[in-house]
């Protein structure tokens, strides 16, 4: 009898520990959602809750949450949000103008971040982008004035214009190219980029010069002045640096 009672107590303790450690998600009623992809999953269309720390459930209506819809969470006052690994895409303006949001982690299965997805999140200071992301839309983090750096994974092959804050007061309008340019930054032509890559691969450019070039390109990116060719150059330089570091070790 004593053994039975002891086993029952142990079982209850184990159950309590499992329950305590289990991830807690917000109630499904905090979210409006609709089935997509032929009923294979759902898209969150609107957040109607009032939490300061939002935990998006991995399933709603017994279907996996696979997309955060356009403007689904815009102009909300939460300070943090946990996006489940079931999500594969974040829509346009999904979290725009969430001015109290301080950090965000893009989970492992997300492949695309939409236009203006986090634009205007003025308190956003930390962003982690997983290496599953392949595209980042225009103005995705535009106006996020608290950001100082965002590591871009090598998986990203398409990046939009003005992804990060652009200071228009410091720009000049180039009538010939019909675009704003910054006098502090030089523009790399496709021919110059091709020549630079050839010299890098041939070992004709010093490590210090490559590091200076990377800093210059990163400055252009964070000022919203980088085009796709320059982004490709930056990624190639990052790969070269990583290979060089591995070879030295």
Image (cartoon, rainbow, N blue to C red):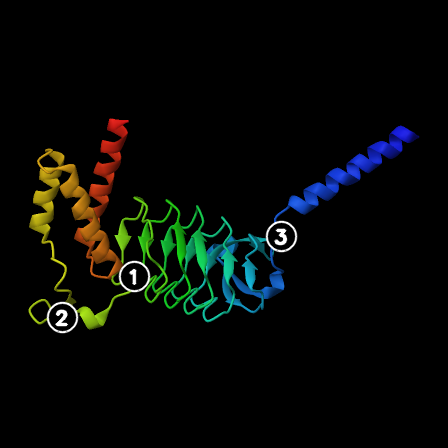
Given this view, does label 2 or label 3 mark the residue nearer the observer?
2
Residue linked to disc 2:
172
Does dot 2 land on a helix, a strand or a loop? strand
Residue 87 or 173: which is nearer the viewer?
173
**Real-space Cα distance between discs 2 and 1?**
18 Å
Specify which label sits upstream in the sequence, 2 or 1: 1
At horizontal 24% and vertical 39% (from top left) the residue drawn is 239
* Label 2 Cα crowd, 10 Å radius (few <14 / some 14-19 / many 20+): few
Residue linked to disc 3:
24
**Real-space Cα distance between discs 1 and 3?**
33 Å
Drawn side of residue 110 relative to residue 156, left or right? right
Residue 72 or 148: which is nearer the viewer?
148
State the mark number for residue 119: none
At horizontal 24% and vertical 42% (from top left) the residue drawn is 238
Does dot 1 land on a helix, a strand or a loop? loop
The quarter of the rendered structure image containing the N terminus is top right
Specify which label sits upstream in the sequence, 1 or 3: 3
In percent of width and height, residue 8 lies at 83, 36
At horizontal 51% and vertical 51% (from top left) the residue drawn is 84
Residue linked to disc 1:
164
């Amino acid at each position: 009898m004593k053994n039975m009672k002891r086993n029952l107590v142990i079982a209850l303790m184990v159950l309590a520990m499992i329950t305590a450690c289990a991830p807690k998600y917000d109630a499904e009623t905090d979210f409006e959602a609709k089935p997509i992809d032929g009923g294979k999953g759902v898209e969150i269309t609107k957040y109607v809750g009032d939490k300061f720390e939002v935990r998006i459930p991995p399933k709603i209506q017994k279907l996996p949450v696979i997309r955060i819809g356009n403007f689904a969470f815009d102009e909300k006052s939460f300070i943090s949000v946990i996006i489940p690994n079931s999500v594969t895409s974040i829509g346009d303006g999904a979290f725009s103008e969430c001015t109290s949001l301080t950090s965000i982690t893009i989970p492992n299965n997300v492949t695309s971040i939409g236009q203006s997805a986090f634009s205007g999140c003025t308190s956003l200071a930390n962003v982690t982008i997983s290496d599953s992301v392949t595209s980042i839309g225009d103005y995705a983090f535009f106006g996020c004035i608290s950001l100082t750096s965002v590591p871009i994974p090598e998986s990203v092959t398409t990046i939009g214009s003005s992804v990060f804050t652009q200071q228009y007061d410091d720009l000049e309008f180039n009538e010939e190219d019909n675009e704003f340019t910054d006098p502090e930054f030089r523009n790399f032509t496709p021919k110059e980029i091709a020549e630079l890559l050839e010299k890098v691969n041939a070992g004709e450019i010093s490590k210090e010069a490559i590091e200076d070039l990377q800093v210059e390109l990163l400055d252009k990116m964070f000022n919203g002045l980088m085009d796709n060719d320059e982004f490709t150059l930056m990624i190639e330089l990052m790969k070269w640096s990583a290979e060089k570091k591995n070879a030295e070790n």
